[in-house]
Amino acid sequence: MNIDGLASGMKTKDVIDALMSVAAIPKTLVTNKITDRNTIISNLQSLNTSLQALADKAKTAASATSLARFSATSSAEAVTVAAGEKARAFSTAVVVDTLATAHAVVTAPGGADAFAGPFTLVAADGTATEISPAGSAASDLVTALNAAGAGVTATVVPGGKDADGRPLSRVQITATQTGAEAAFTLHRGSAAEVAAGDASNMATETGAAVIGHGADAVIRLFAGTAAEQTVTSSSNTFTGIGEGIDITVGAASTQPVTITVAADVTAQSDAAAAFVKDIAALLTRIDNGSKATVAAPGSATTLGVFTGDSTVRALRGALASAVQSPVDGVSPSTIGISVDKFGALSFDQEKFTAAMRADPDATQATFSAIAGRVQSTTAQYSDKYDGLLTQRITGQQTEVKTLQQQVERMDLRLDVRRATLERTYAAMEVRLSGLQSQSSWLTSQLAALTPSSK
């Protein structure tokens, strides 16, 4: 029961709160330390995430073909060229004889009951799929064909009118893929009847037709020479015409079409610049987080989140060394990668481009070696099990847990302290109240002993 100043007139609650504030100062210091450590942990984790992303990029950049960038051109708009990562400088001529087409059949016209099943769709490889429409209308056959998953699509098309003026319908069936292997036949009859030769091919019925013959695209390489070679494709795309080179044809042509793949020095330089930029951004981030801002006289100096952190400082030095140290006696500055006296990493794109033009193999080797060293450094610090930066984060987290346990114990002691103070002041108020009662009684007794005066 809180009897705030009942007898003393004091605001005992305020007095207790003030005393508790003083008693809670150690807890406040520990709580502030926890907040500070959590801020450091958050920034270290963010730095580690960026370091892991750089490790992935460095792994790619360290490959012997990481700078392989090619531009592909064609002398005709109907032929497009795509150069992959394994492409090499290449030039040849192709003659496009035919394009790939999809097989298509249209049935003879029929009335509302002309399409009763069963039907059997036979693929080019002999696979038979029996089709059983729910009804006898053209739409029923279309629904069954589309649901069969047999590599064809079907639709109802008008078939004119019969002698009595009633509308007729056809069913058009088209292979979902181009090429000879996607050709098919549709038979009126069950699969067993097809096997026995008792089912009829619907494309041969009166009024039916094959309106598209499934065929492969055909091109010729080295046309007109003793090395002339025919290449086919079920689609209009031909893969592996050259190492890592694919072409897509859009129209037949009797004239040779020249396709050319050449090294794209600008793209190579852009790729190297992007990688160096990622390293520079990480170094700058570490530098900014390690700065201490000196305030005016009388004011506190503001420290960065990484100021004084030996692990981050060592990481910064290791990354800088990985980038600027010579490779087999060759300075990275010869290919445009350099660090100035202030530690800032820069990339000279013109110098790198010139180096690629002069000696692409040596430039690639130097760049890959630098990337390999960066990868090794990032792995050393960011490995999720024993990385140095990972261990630093784990250590900070362990310290925070210890501090949180201290806070919990402090909370218990402070609760006990408050309860003690409340009991003490409550007892004081009760005692003062008793003394005040005695004082009033004594005063009344003394007043009774004193004779009154008129």
Image (spheres, rainbow, N blue to C red):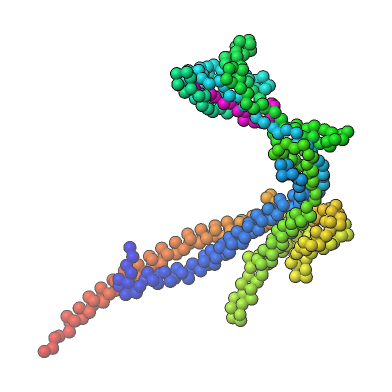
In front here: 59 or 205?
A: 205
Is residue 179 one of those drawn in magenta?
yes
Tell which of 117 and 1 is nearer to you: 117
- Residue 340 vertical placement versus 96 (above, below): below
Decide if residue 127 is on the left or right side of residue 143.
right
Magenta part of the chain: 168-182
Residue 166 horizontal side relative to residue 401, left or right: left
- Most foreground residue, 383 or 386: 383
**Spot occupied by residue 217 in the image (x, y as percentages of width and height):** 72, 32
Eyeballing the image, is 232 above or below 198? below
In the rendered image, the quadrant that contains the C terminus is bottom left
Q: Who's the residue at 82% across and 42% down the image? A: 92
Q: Residue 261 magenta-drawn?
A: no
Location of residue 353 (image quadrant):
bottom right
Q: Is residue 371 visible?
A: no
User: Which residue is pictured at 69% across the width and 56% down the height?
Assistant: 51
Q: Position of residue 393 (x, y in %)?
A: 64, 56
Q: Is residue 300 visible?
A: yes
The correct choice, above or below, for 266 with respect to 116 in the image is: below
Q: Residue at x 65, y 30 (%)?
A: 102
Which secondary structure class fits the magenta region best?
Answer: strand
Query: If the image is split into quadrants, where does the N terminus sit?
Result: bottom left
Instruction: State the image coordinates of residue 25 (x, y, percent, origin top left).
Output: 51, 69
Identify the image quadrant of residue 279. bottom right
- Image coords of residue 132 (percent x, y): 53, 19
Q: Residue visible at 32% across and 72% down?
A: 5
